Image: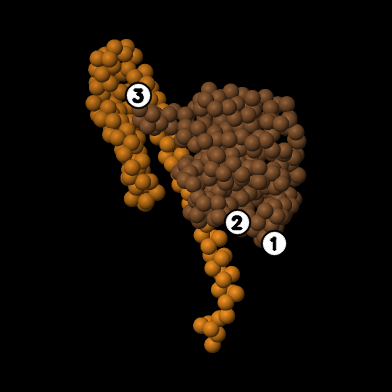
Chain colours: A orange, B brown
Amino acid sequence: MESLSVTIQLISLLGATLFMIMIFRLIVQGRLREEYSIVWIFCTVILIFFSIWRKGLEKISLLLGVYYPPSLIFLAAIFAIIVFLVHLSVVNSKLQNQIKDLSQEMAYLKKEVQTLRENSQKAPEPVTAS
Amino acid sequence: MSSPSSIPPKILIVVPCFNEEAAIAAVVTDINRVKAKHELMLDVLAVNDCSTDNTLTVLQTLNCLYLDLPVNLGIGGAMQTGYRYAWRNGYDIAVQMDGDGQHPAQELMTILQPIMDSRADVVIGSRFLTKEGFQSSAMRRLGINYFRWLNRTLVGQTIYDSTSGFRAFNRRTLAVVNKYYPDEYPEPEAIVQFGLSNLKMLEVPVQMRERQGGVSSINNGQAIYYMLKVTLGSLFVYARLHRKKMPNMT
């Protein structure tokens, strides 16, 4: 019982650390913006925390009146996932709005460029004619 | 805002086009004919919403302004592109006319007159006030009845043809639309938006034709989604604007 627990402790510690390294690498490479990484770093810290403090989960479960400690993990994880999904939808909506505004701006500019080009073609070209 | 009648208003006709190569030429020609007949200060602006056919090529040969969107924005986004253009370039009136020929140009003056006389901020061309011309399918009329009920409940004003896209806006309305206009299926939702923005809406009877080309933006499979989207959109616009409206009323 005790040896199994130590093995799983090591595995989860290793997993959490690898995950943390992956997040940091993504930020360093510029593929993940810092504001989205905060959630992930926070999650990893919690994972590492409970990997080290093995009795912690049981204690907190008892404190909250949850008799089967792993179910607390699922509850917390599902809650975190749902919150993050909503956050992503908000970000997505914002992006869609920005894309709409940008495309409209682009359409106006395309028209502007075309008008300018037509006007310059109509006018005699004293400057460019050499 | 009472402008002297000696200065004719600058009018922009916004024609949203998505794969309308067959019908668009006739639509633009018809509008230009009406313009010449009534000596209006009028520009036609076609908004090409990323068509996959030759709409853009056809537009280039026509006597009209056009905008070419780089990304497909849907009817609401395309219309807002036109309305924002009107707002920025100082047009007094903007009119929406579909690119498929459903809205006959002969009815243009019917739509424009109430705004020119400062009788309304928004004029909506309605198929149902006099039961003439193309009346749409039974399924669609059922939906339209539902939206009428929804708008009446939320705004307190009855608009019979709330899905009609044949509309004219004055500058006051353009200011509202410049800030926000629904993306998808904007017509019924916009009515709630206008009502709660204290804009005066007026419905005038017009005759519509069956589409001259292209396909409807709504098929039967999308009808349920359409109903849901518009209901939600209307309710949320109501929730958003209703709260803002309260301090003004007290």
Q: Amino acid at mark 2?
A: Met
| Nearer-the-camera pick, B66 or B200 | B200
Q: Which image quadrant is residue B190 in?
A: top right
State whether residue B239 appears in this view: yes
Q: Are marks 1 and 2 in contact (CB under 8 Å)?
A: no
* Residue appearing at x 67%, y 53% in the figure: B38
Which secondary structure, mark 3? helix
Q: Nearer the viewer, mark 1 or mark 2?
A: 2
Give the image location of residue B9, x and y in percent. Answer: 56, 53
Measure the C-alpha gap from mark 2 to mark 3. Answer: 64 Å
Residue B176 placement (x, y as % from top left): 47, 42
Quadrant housing residue B150: top right
Helix, strand, or loop for circle 2? strand
Q: Secondary structure at mark 1?
A: helix
Question: Position of B170 compared to B161: left or right?
Answer: left
Q: Position of residue B19 (x, y in %)?
A: 68, 48
- Choose between B223 and B100: the one closer to the eye: B100
- Relative to B5, is B138 above or below? above
Disc 1 marks a residue whose amino acid type is: Thr
The numbered mark, 1 or 2, whose residue comes first in the sequence reads 2
| Disc on res. A76 | 3
Pointers 1 and 3 within a single chain: no
Q: Amino acid at mark 3?
A: Ala
Q: Residue at x 57, y 65 (%)?
A: A114
Marks 2 and 3 close (CB-CB < 8 Å) = no
**Label 2, residues with CA under 10 Å away: few <14, some 14-19, many ≥20:** some
Q: Nearer the viewer, mark 2 or mark 3?
A: 2
Q: Chain of mark 1?
A: B
The residue under label 2 is B41
Q: Residue at x 55, y 81 (%)?
A: A125
Q: Which mark is residue B61?
A: 1
